[in-house]
Image: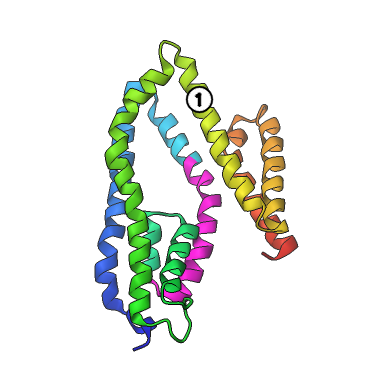
Amino acid sequence: MDYLQIARDPQLWFVCLPPVIMVLIQASFFIRYSVKASSAVGLTLDECKRSFRIGCVCAIGPSLGVVTVLLGMMAILGTPIPWLRLSIVGNAQQEMMMATIGADLFHTTIGADNYTPAVFATSVWMMTLHGCNFMIAVILVLHKMEGVKKKLAGKDSMLLTIIGSGALIGVITMLGVGQAKNSIGSAFTVIMSSIVMLGLNQLGKKNTKLKEYAVGISMVISMFTAQFIFGS
């Protein structure tokens, strides 16, 4: 049997849809309770709505990358499984990497003639087990982070802000450099987004709203510019 008959079987949606629906429900609850708790930190309803709009715009850039890989995964792994995995994890590159590792265990590649249903099942298991790492880390570590935060901050409330900002800068830089070395187009995208971001921050001194949407706008402009110039 061709593995795509299984990968594209409508019955597979009965297995894959419940977790996707659960993610949507969790997101709706998160938004609802965040708005309810906003008064405790001095946020008004208008400020909550503005933050939500900013988050939506800033999510456009990263989402485009996920959607691009999703379309590629749908062509070779069917529709239900990619939708399931990317709805839960969202890291398209790692999901594709784990599916490839599953195929490598049988000395084949995804979509090859000898990529059988058994190999397809192995790829799905590899993606699933890879996602379990994050769940285990959250269960074992998350509840201890409040204590770690208090120890790091001590009596200086600004120290935690500085540490958090430094960590965020480090993570973004690491991811950017990691992508930049893949190709000239990737390097151009990273540099272009940095330049656009700096420019928008300068313009944002006069227009606060522009500064709030700077991240999402810089991502979109840099990606489309790189696509137009390099075609990749």
Q: Residue furthest top?
A: 155
Name the residue tied to disc 1: 163
At numbered mark 1, what does the secondary structure look like: helix, strand or loop? helix
**Whether residue 8 is situated above or below residue 229 in the rendered picture:** below
Identity of the residue drawn at 42% across and 17% down = 153
Q: Is residue 67 magenta?
A: yes
Given residues 157 and 135, the one toward you in this image is 135
Q: Position of residue 105 (x, y in %)?
A: 41, 72
Circle 1 residues within 10 Å: few <14, some 14–19, many ≥20: some
Q: Is residue 213 magenta?
A: no
Looking at the image, how many numbered discs can be counted on the residues? 1
Q: Residue at x 53, y 34 (%)?
A: 168
Report if residue 170 is visible in the image: yes
Return the x and y of residue 54 as percentages of the image width and height.
Answer: 50, 39
Q: Is 53 left or right of 10, judged from the image as shown?
A: right
> In the visual, does 113 lie left or right of 12?
right
Is 34 situated left or right of 46 in this image?
left
- Relative to residue 156, is residue 4 depicted above or below? below
Q: Residue at 41% across / 76% down in the picture?
A: 106
- Where does the image place residue 62, in percent across and percent down from the top left? 53, 51
Rendering coords of residue 14 (x, y %): 24, 70
Name the amino acid, label 1. Ile
Q: Which residues are magenta?
A: 55-80
Say whether residue 137 is left or right of residue 155.
left
Magenta stretch secondary structure, dominant: helix
